[in-house]
Image (cartoon, grey):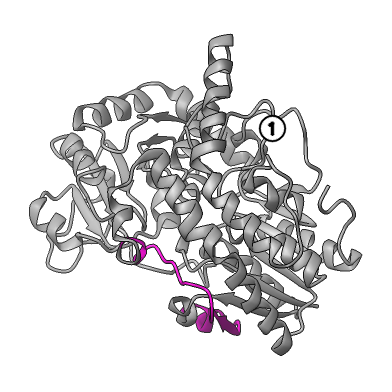
Amino acid sequence: MKVLLASQAIAGHFNPMTGIGVRLKDEGHDVGWYTGSTLAGRLNELGIPHYPFDRAIEHTGDNLNELYPQRAKLKGPMAIRFDGERIFASNVTNFFEDIRDVHQRFPFDAVVMDNSMFIQRLVAVVLGKPVVSFVAIGNMESDPLVPPLFFGFAPARTPAHKILHAGARLVSDQLVTKPARASYARQLQGYGLETPKGTPITDETYRWSHAIIQTGTASLDFPRRNINPKVHYVGALLPHRAGADVGPDATAAPAGQQPPTAAGAYRRTVVVTQGTVDNRDPAKLMIPTIEALKDTDSLIVVATGGANTEELRRRYPQPNVVVEDYVDFARVFPSTDVFVTNGGFGGVLLSLSHGVPLVTAGLNEGKSDVNARVEYAGVGVNLKTETPKAAAIRSAVDTVLGDPAWRERAQAMRGQFEAEDSVGAAVEVIKAVVAAGGTPGVGG
């Protein structure tokens, strides 16, 4: 079969799909990938033909604030409002017309797409091709039991909570997501398609996909009243690794830095990252974590995502502080005691796939909802802020390490991940959809 993978050029959306692309290729299927030009080199390494954006604006983790200087000043719901309209919804027509052109050169049987592209309906209805959506974050489909998105709420437990959630949902519908939904509806009207009023834009990807590959496990989602049979939880879909011996050893000394004492000499190992999007200001999470733990018997491994690495190395020459652009988490997590993160879903899944409990601190880019799930599942402490104080981080780390129940719950979730061949499960979903020519119920 011929399969086109399609994704934003953002690492957290592209990387988890790479294992699927390689597995399909290795099984002998004809695979192409539609994404931004910044990922051409990576696709060349994977041996997958690249179909670059033509009309579509290429958004990456590095250029968002350069493309939209006003974005850096926005916080909370207003930041979500801006991203929804300008980064996601505005590209719908561009994405679809690009993919329609790709189809002339690569007549694919199905598209496996990043759900945040919002072109499922156009591909399924206008192009008439089966669509499998890939969701790199938590399940975003609305449900009466699930709190409104982007507020970081856990499920309502009291009448007061239900009233609060109802108000937040109204704010979301009328303020936060309305511009994106309006943009989406206008663009679909250009193809003669009407969008029912009141339908959340985030539900469109679930409604118009033939199947949904959902990263994570149902245990990391909130309880739901309505179970969508098209949603397939497949576990932790991690970036493809060519072999076990890949990337730098995060416990090795960086160039020009004194080799740290062996990790075994420290009582605990703490890994911290701000991801690859919101990592320009290390004072948000990296610096307070170092300050919290630098004078303790902890090995602190800092993954900067390529920002401020040398500055942090100069500022913190202590032998128990290791600062790297990127860390091979798969190598480091087996000896990690706590993962401190702003809540990128890929990092959270990787941590839990190794049974490592978390301390989370992040609000934007949907991270508040990820961190609420971490807290609800009992596998980490949610600090509910983007800028935690060093004392709060130290207290949270001590809390997680002081009670073995945190690690026990993380280890139990690890067992669920280990039971899955995540890539294999995802590929089987794709093959089933192609074999059926698309399943019934799309648009229902």
Instruction: Please rate how many residues cluster around mark 1, counting C-alpha atoms within 10 Å: few if below 14, some from 14 to 19, many from 20.
Output: some
Callout 1 secondary element: loop
Q: Which residues are magenta?
A: 42-65
> Foreground residue, 71 or 406?
71
Q: Is the N terminus in the top left, top right, bottom left or bottom right quadrant?
A: bottom right
Question: Residue 124 appears in which quarter of the rendering?
Answer: bottom right
- 46 relative to 417, above or below: below
User: Is residue 53 a member of the stretch shown in magenta?
Assistant: yes
Give the percent coordinates (x, y) of residue 119: 66, 63
User: Is residue 120 a member of the stretch shown in magenta?
Assistant: no
- 119 relative to 150, above or below: below
Residue at x-position 46% and y-position 46%: 81
Give the percent coordinates (x, y) of residue 183: 57, 56
Residue at x-position 57% and y-position 32%: 148
Q: Does any portion of residue 334 appear in the rendered image?
A: no
Kindly identify which residue carries mark 1.
143
Give the percent coordinates (x, y) of residue 130: 80, 66
